Image: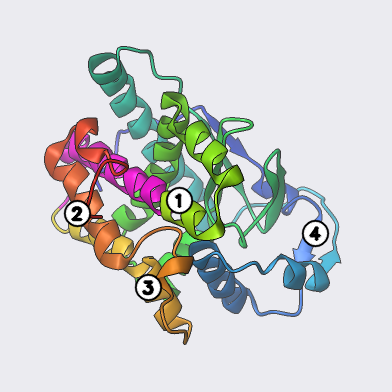
Amino acid sequence: MRLRGVRRSRNIEDRRRTGGGGRAIGGIGGVGLLVVLAIAYFTGVDVTPLLEEVAQPQQTAPRELSAEEVAAGDFSAQVLATTEEVWSDIFPAQVGEAYVPPVLVLYSGVTQSPCGGASGATGPFYCPADNKAYLDTEFFATLERKLGARGDFAAAYVIAHEVAHHVQDQLGILGQVNAYRQSASQTDANAITVRLELQADCLAGVWASSVDGLLEPGDIEEALNAARQIGDDTLQRNAGRVPQPHTFTHGTSAQRSRWFAAGYQGGDMAACDTFAAERL
């Protein structure tokens, strides 16, 4: 992705210098922890009890960021800026409203949010309570080294997907889905969550279509590959489990890549009505 000369968003809250909010995860190797947490996020497996058992207090004195962390922060701020420009154009044209961008919180290890404690266990996520997206930039390394989703556009897709949840929130979709899930069975709640997540993939595709001038050869395939690598069926299979469709919360690899492609090819929010689709 060609980001040279692209501005950095000011809607960044960088908490990485605080050392992750005062707690560190011990007892599990760093890379192994990232893999466990990534799989937990995308499969819905609750690893919070395990994390609480191995959490150890640590000092929260400010620390220097590594060159890799600085680069990840700059990259995230630039990608976020492209989402601001895209959705600020699309909302007036297709929704008839002004777009209010979210804040992207960058953290390392663990932090706090109104939606609960944030850690690698949650993965990148959006919190409607404060209109902020949360990202541990170490997740980029997990994508590339352990999940097989290589390339800078794979990482950009992750950010665009979380911003898409903010788009859903501003449209009122996220609130409606959350209200439905409160009284639904677990199976029905999972099913509608899959539609929500696939719509976010599609909206990320709409963003990708709108930044086509910044793309390099192979970028779209990087995003499609990332979508495939983090499909519920692929993650469960890679974790040594037989895929259980009734537990899926994000969609299969084929579904995630197909809906991203639908958004990219259509370039229109109308192409992303996963809730009305008979076939996902």
Q: CA distance from mark 2 to mark 1?
A: 25 Å
What secondary structure is the magenta-colored segment mainly?
helix
Q: Secondary structure at mark 3?
A: helix
Mark 3 vs mark 4: give the one in front. Answer: 3
Residue topped by disc 4: 23
Which color scheme is applied? rainbow
Q: Position of residue 51 (x, y in %)?
A: 74, 69
Helix, strand or loop at label 4? It is: strand
How packed mark 3 is, by other alpha carbons closer than 10 Å (few <14, some 14-19, many 20 or more), is many
Residue 199 location in percent, x, y?
33, 44
Disc on res. 217: none
**Alpha carbons under labels 1 and 4: distance apart:** 31 Å
| Amino acid type for the residue under numbered disc 2 | Ile
State the separation of the CA atoms marked 3 and 4.
Answer: 32 Å
Quadrant for the C terminus, please: bottom left
Q: Callout 3, which amino acid?
A: Asp
Magenta segment boundaries in residue numbering? 193-216
Q: State whether residue 205 appears in this view.
A: yes
Q: Which residue is mark 1?
A: 193
Quadrant in the rendering for residue 128: top right
- What is the x, y in percent for residue 211? 22, 36
Q: Amino acid at mark 4?
A: Arg
Q: Earlier in the sequence, mark 1 or mark 4?
A: 4
Crowd band around label 1 with a 10 angstrom C-alpha radius: few (<14), some (14–19), many (20+): many
> Which is more N-terminal, label 1 or label 3?
1
Q: Are marks 2 and 1 in contact (CB under 8 Å)?
A: no
Inter-mark Cα distance, 2 to 3: 22 Å
Is residue 48 in the magenta section? no
Q: Which residue is denoted by mark 3 in the rendering?
A: 233
Q: Which residue corresponds to the image point at 59% horizontal and 79% vertical from the top-left?
A: 32
